[in-house]
Amino acid sequence: MTAIADQYNLIILGTGLAGYTLARDFRKHDTTRSLALVTRDDGAWYSKPMLSNALAKDKTASELATRTADEMAASLDASVITGCNITDINTDKKYLIIHERKVYFDTLVLCHGASQITLPIDGDGTADVLSVNSLDDYALFRDRLDGVGHVAIMGPGLIGCEFANDLANVGIQVSVIGPDSAPLERLLPPEASAALKTALSSLGVSWHLETVVDHITRTNTGYRLTLADGHTLEAGQVLSAAGLRPNIALAQSAGLKTGRGILVDRHLCTSHPDVYALGDCIELGGRLLPYVLPIMHGSKALAQTLSGSPTPVVLPAMPVAIKTPAHSIVVASPPPDAQGDWTTTSDDHGVRALYESADGLLLGFVLTGQHVKEKMKLERTMPAVLS
Ligand SMILES: Cc1cc2nc3c(=O)[nH]c(=O)nc-3n(C[C@H](O)[C@H](O)[C@H](O)COP(=O)(O)OP(=O)(O)OC[C@H]3O[C@@H](n4cnc5c(N)ncnc54)[C@H](O)[C@@H]3O)c2cc1C
């Protein structure tokens, strides 16, 4: 087991993309101050976006874990403390409880992510519903798919559609259930949703939209799902992809200000001057940014701030590529307060939708099919998310 010191200059909570990226960036500026990362998992390094296309690539969880915690610790000249669920942070005296000991910090960075939303569903099968938001989740999911021919996915959003495509690619029948009237309805204009739906349907994906799951009961062969519209479905496994919510309870109990996420300013500083936060757990300027690129940009700025050069985060336009190879999609969502209109064109090559202000400024876009080739050209003309 890693030796744990009584005090570190910098402690990072979490060894996901945010925690490890920040540790790497910090070490580029500072090779002398003591650094510890703490996680409740095994601290292996992996790429989370690969979890929703790993079945078709035939990757096991251990193949996705490319470095162990010990290897990460050696490369970062840091302590990586694993298997430790942090429940207690004292921000006045600046310590947290690690394996029942007080460990003091000069600076703490919270990178402890988000958790799957649990849907209120009745029935004895509810406890067996899986969701995939970590390597361990993926290992369990892959294990439970053994011999399963049909998976029901709750949630027709980004993660639900990616898993639907991945499962269909390995020959598993998929039913997607959700309250929306179309897949990815909250991100895409109707033409693009329809194109995705058609492409996934052609792989055998079936849809139960504008309804929700009421009951899940165990059967001899798997599960029976009873939907609010009265239909029933039989499935060998049920996957929930109902969305993620930032982990804020720990920050709240430590007296930090929270909204939908842990509230941070442009320097990623929380309401305590020595506690920062990065990644899926934060809310910045009224927005949650649960994607890779905001973490990469935020990490670079925060590493400089923590090394003595206060640097505000700058976020350029950051389109997200959705991993549905049946129909490629790139989305650059307009800011929530944007004033503008969509212009959408569809042809045999896919859908091209531009969101422009009254004076013709491009504020967002959705490209599907072969139109995704235009991504870089459009991205360059968009204003920054945070300049
Ligand atoms: C299936 C899937 C596919 C995705 N695909 C894409 C994509 O294609 N493109 C894209 O941009 N984004 C994608 N995302 C989002 C992206 O992966 C996340 O934004 C990013 O990985 C979040 O990193 P994080 O470090 O903030 O959180 P996490 O990776 O969740 O890390 C949190 C860490 O904190 C630890 N932790 C949590 N609570 C505690 C505690 N109390 N005590 C100790 N340790 C704790 C955890 O063990 C973990 O080490 C995807 C997400 C998912 C789930």
Image (cartoon, grey):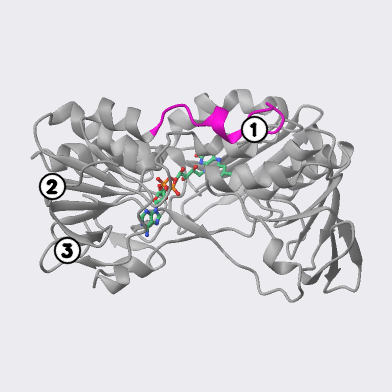
Q: Could you tell me if residue 383 is visible in this image?
A: no
Query: Does label 1 or label 3 sit earlier along the sequence?
Result: 1
The kind of residue on which mark 1 rests is Ala
Gap between marks 2 and 3 measured at Cα: 18 Å
Secondary structure, mark 3, is: loop
For the magenta stretch, what is the residue range? 55-68
**Residue at x 83% of width, y 45% of height:** 148
Gap between marks 1 and 3 measured at Cα: 39 Å
**How many numbered circles does the render carry?**
3
Query: Label 1: which residue?
Result: 54
The kind of residue on which mark 3 rests is His
- Residue 20, x across and y down, in percent: 33, 37
- Residue 302, x across and y down, in percent: 22, 42
Q: Is residue 191 left or right of residue 337?
A: right
- Residue 211, x across and y down, in percent: 80, 68
Q: Tell whether position 272 is magenta.
A: no
Query: Label 3: which residue?
Result: 272
Query: Does label 2 or label 1 sit earlier along the sequence?
Result: 2
Marking on residue 8: 2
Position of residue 48 relative to residue 113, above or below, is above
Q: Is residue 2 left or right of residue 231?
A: left
Quadrant, the N terminus: top left
Gap between marks 2 and 1 measured at Cα: 37 Å
Position of residue 242 relative to residue 22, above or below, is below
